Amino acid sequence: MAAADAATFDGAPPEAADARGEEAARVAAAAAAAAAPPFPPELAETTFAAAPPAGAAGLVACELHRLLPPALKELSDWTAKARIRAADTLAGTLWLVGPAATDHLGPLLAALSKTVEDSDEGVARQVRRCAQLVGRSCDLAVYVPLVLDQLRAPSGAALVGSAATAGCGGNSAGGGADFLRGGGHSRMRPAAVTVLEGAETDAGAIGRRAGWLSLLGELLAGATAEQLRPHLSALLATVARPVFCVPGRASDDDAGASFAATQLRLCSFLGQLISSAGAACASGDNGLLLYSALMRVASVPSSAQHGFASQRRAIECLSAMAAAVDGGSAEALHAVFLPPLLAQITAGETYKSWKVDSAEWHLFQALCRQAGGATCARVLLLLLPPLAAVLSPKEEPTLRLTALSLLDSLLSAEGFLAAPEWAEMGEHVLAAMLLPNAVWRAGKPAEHVRLASYSCVQKLLSADAISGEQLGAHMGGALPLLVAGLDDDNVESRRIACVILATALRRLGPSRVSHEQMRQLYPELTKRLDDASDGVRVAACVPLVAMLEQVRYSASWSEAHNFDRTNFGYFVNGLLVHLDDPDPEIQAAVAEVLERAAPIDPPEFCSLVRAVRGRHRSSKLCDALLENAGGHTGGTLV
């Protein structure tokens, strides 16, 4: 049969129309005689589940070109009563004519797409039945391309079918000519007028796409895996396009609502496709397209107005997709499809233009968070260049903050730091991505960026991703930033800076900590014992102990040593002040540091303790320290 738009209500001479009608009658009668189960859900246990009388089918098919225009016109009426009457008429007509409707699919599908989500449930239910009747009777090879053309159409395009639906007038072949030209005058609904004027907005285009998606789902409701297989690639390629129902940038509330609704429709359609086609759509090239479409929906940022419904539904579909492939897990699915999808979105270094609201940046984050640490570790070399680009200090703080949050999540994920590439890449991540973001800059956003950067540095160093030798090569630039962190306005930044310094000192070892670095460190660390936060005061004692573990001591200064008696005296005196702190927790923490200091130079240590013993409210701790130091000199020093 001819293509739909080429042979529908074209004002052909009566003889030609009658000839087509006779052919349609023969087709309808044959289809009616051969009708058999299975039936789609909306048709089961209804009149439409039975085969129509062959004679009636032939008669209605012969007059179909005269019956459809007024029914489609009435389907766009203002009143629900008129629309339900039109939907009932269409359902009965389509049941009778079967495949004879193929010649009229253009305007028919356009009309159904606009009412399949009708506000009146009675209309919507009957329209769904109409769509399932069309899907059962007509060839997928005819209607699937027609629907996909509409789904691919950009805003303001692909309006022929919609205009035809809006303007159908007359009840004859002559009226049908007006129908194609958008003629006729009826009580049209405002949406139809908008389409005719070509003034469709982005939100309108996405809303129209939702209608076509719902219609496609109903058309394919009864399709088998065998019937779907030849069309899967085209179906999935269409819905996997980056802009199909995901905004390229942040959208306003109205557009956001349209996008959210369309995303839910897409997830429902893809879930149906997985259920019907199984492994055929969940593996190979089709699997990559399906994975891409679902992850794009899962990556859309939510809001208080729109919630997380579509994102949750997308994740559920991913689980169903994994189950369709030999009952596998979502982790196995990510392991297969994450690398090629990451390669696609990072090709050509497009990540250099990502902004905080870029759809591709959201997708990148969702992929990393959903895939798991072990899977991401296998594609580490694909992950790091985009992260390095968005963490450039030239980028806006909000973008860098989201990137640091992502990196923090990855560094915490099990298996991520097990990648062998970390042996080489760890120091570059520290020097090029994290330390530049720890530089002090004015403002609250910059403060949050510093905190996030310190958190990542802590996790990177704690996981042995950087050797002592590698860390030593960067301490010249790192130490001033970490010391500055001890005086940050944010209390958590100060606490984490203490933890980082303790880890870094132990990683470096005595041979890599210089005299100058010791002189730079201990005054700043002892200063933290006066911090406004007791948590920071206790935390500062940890790097003090770590520092003492790296001491190469000499009573007098020398190149071979990094701590002398003069600095030792300043250091111990700075601690003894806090040994008399009112807080027992602080006293205990400081006492532990002093116990570690005693063996370095016991005579000098005891002399310093005796000098302050009488000024303390209680001499108990001083006496304990003196007794401990006496053990290191072989006698009693009290």
Image: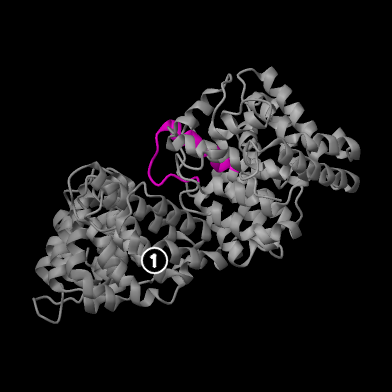
Would you say 188 lies left or right of 623 here?
Answer: right
Would you say 532 lies left or right of 459 here?
Answer: left
Q: Amino acid at mark 1?
A: Ala
Would you say 566 lies left or right of 411 here?
Answer: left
Q: Residues within 10 Å of mark 1 (few under 14, many from 20)?
A: few
Q: Quadrant of residue 111?
A: top right
Decide whether residue 458 is among the magenta residues.
no
Report the coloring of the rendering. Answer: one colour
How many marks do you count on the picture? 1
Q: Quadrant of residue 337?
A: bottom right
Residue placed most toward the observer, 133 or 536: 133
Q: Tell me, yes or no, if residue 397 can be seen here.
A: yes
Residue placed most toward the observer, 158 or 372: 158
Question: Where residue 315 sits: x, y (%)?
Answer: 58, 50
Residue sitting at x 40%, y 47%:
248
Residue assigned mark 1: 347
Residue sitting at x 31%, y 67%:
429
- The magenta region covers 245-265
Residue placed most toward the observer, 509 or 394: 394
| Vertical comparison of 538 with 471: above or below | above
Would you say 496 lies left or right of 150 here?
Answer: left
| Vertical comparison of 274 with 131: above or below | below
Q: Quadrant of the C terminus?
A: bottom left
Q: Quadrant of residue 26?
A: top right
Question: Where residue 254 sits: x, y (%)?
Answer: 44, 31
Q: Specify the farthest residue to the bottom.
A: 560
Residue sitting at x 52%, y 49%:
152
Element at label 1: helix
Question: Where residue 521 sits: x, y (%)?
Answer: 18, 62
Question: Where residue 482 sits: x, y (%)?
Answer: 22, 59
| Vertical comparison of 457 with 161: above or below | below
Decide whether residue 263 is among the magenta residues.
yes
